Every structure is written in C-alpha cells, then in structure tokens.
Image (cartoon, grey):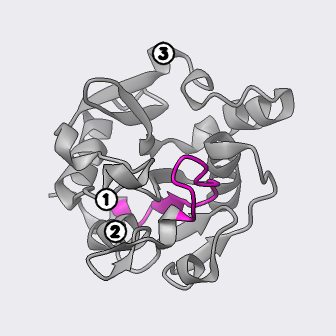
Amino acid sequence: MIEQCILDQIQPVVLVGGQSKRFGRDKLIEPINGTPMAAIPINTLRQVFGPRVAIVGQCDQQVTSLADRVIHDPYPGLGPVGGLCAALEYSKSDVFVCAGDLVAIDEQTIRTIIAASFETPDALAYLAMSDRLQPTIGLYRADCVSHFKNAVETRKLKLGMVLSQESVFRVPVDSGTIVNINRPDDL
C-alpha cells in the first residue's frame, strides 16, 4: 500500500486540451454510461489521490466542472507537451498524468505505476507500457520541467521525444486498462 503522504506529493492531472478531430466532435463530453468521457480518468485518479484532480487544456465547461482544479495552460495548441509543461510548472512537484479519453483506466494501473517509481527512483518518468509506450499515462518527476520547457521553446512537441529513453522507466500494465478513444467506432 502506498502511503498517503507520498500520494500527497504528487499532483494528479488529466489532459483535456485535444481537438477530437478524428472523433468529429468533442469526445471528452461524449456520454459513457451516462457521464462525460473525461469523468472516467478524473474519478479514477480521485480513487487514488483524493479530491484534488486537476485538468489542463482548453475544454468544454462540462469537463471543467468535473475537475477539482483547473491549471491554466499558457501553451494552448502545443498538445500533451504543452499541457504537461503547464502542469509541472504549476505544481512544482511530481505529476501523475492521464489522457482525458481513457475509458478503462483503473486504480490498480495507477498504483502499479506509482509503485514502480520506488523500484527505480532515478528515472525521470514512469510510463505505462503495453504493446507500446503510453506517454500520457504515468508519473513525471518534478525534475522533468526543464526538459518540457525546452521542448516547448524549441517546438519539439512529440511527447515521446522530450525525455531520453534511458530516463524513462517502462511499467508493464494490462493493455485493457489503457484504451483510449479516437473515433466513434472505438466506443
């Protein structure tokens, strides 16, 4: 069991700034079992961290009302790199991030990733790994902020390229829990 004092040092964040182009409409407000899609990662993070989940990115008011706090995004349009940079700058602490379109994320997956940070404490990020690396599901250390600032300044906006591969710890997780939705047919 992860002690609450450790969890209190991590800012849980949901990235909500995407444009849903492939979905054709705002997917984060798409109802899943009667609630907006973005409620799933927000509520799952609450199960682990309590009622202090932040969102970052421009989004519909329905999504904003789901969060416990909103982090201003000074980097609109710069994708997950900009959102993570904003979250790291705001919190000045480690950040656990989930994409807003994760419809099957569960508490165990989040706890598994956090637990991995104790096994290899010198990594900068601990990211979900299934058949491929999932950079929008994981724990980013506060020390990542300079890497993200540099990526924003130089417009190197591919999330998987911000940190060196050696500084990322890959955490094996159940691929069924990290499903994200890109098109209506994915539902």
Q: Earlier in the sequence, mark 2 or mark 1?
A: 2
Q: Which residues are the magenta region?
A: 7-26
Q: Which quadrant of the figure contains the N terminus?
A: bottom left
Q: Secondary structure at mark 3?
A: helix
The picture places residue 96, in percent across and down from the top left corner, at 44, 52
Placement of the C terminus among the 4 image quadrants: bottom left
Q: Secondary structure at mark 1?
A: loop
* Label 3 crowd (10 A; few <14 / some 14-19 / many >=20): few
Which label was assigned to residue 165?
3
Numbered badge on residue 40 = 2
Q: What's the residue at 50%, 60% (across, down)?
A: 14
Q: Is residue 19 magenta?
A: yes
| Mark linked to residue 93 | none
Q: Determine which residue is flagged by label 1.
A: 103
Q: Is residue 56 magenta?
A: no
Q: CA distance from mark 3 to mark 1?
A: 27 Å
Expressed as whole percent of the image width and height from the top left, the position of residue 78 reads 74, 43
**Which is more N-terminal, label 2 or label 3?**
2
Residue at image location 64% in from the left, 69% down from the top:
59
Mark 2 is on which residue type? Ile
Residue 82 x %, y %? 71, 46
Q: Quadrant of residue 173?
A: top left
Amino acid residing under circle 3: Gln
Instruction: Locate residue 93, reporting x and y percent.
Output: 56, 54
Q: Magenta region's main secondary structure?
A: loop
Residue at x-position 44% and y-position 71%: 30
| Residue 43 horizontal side relative to residue 58, left or right | left
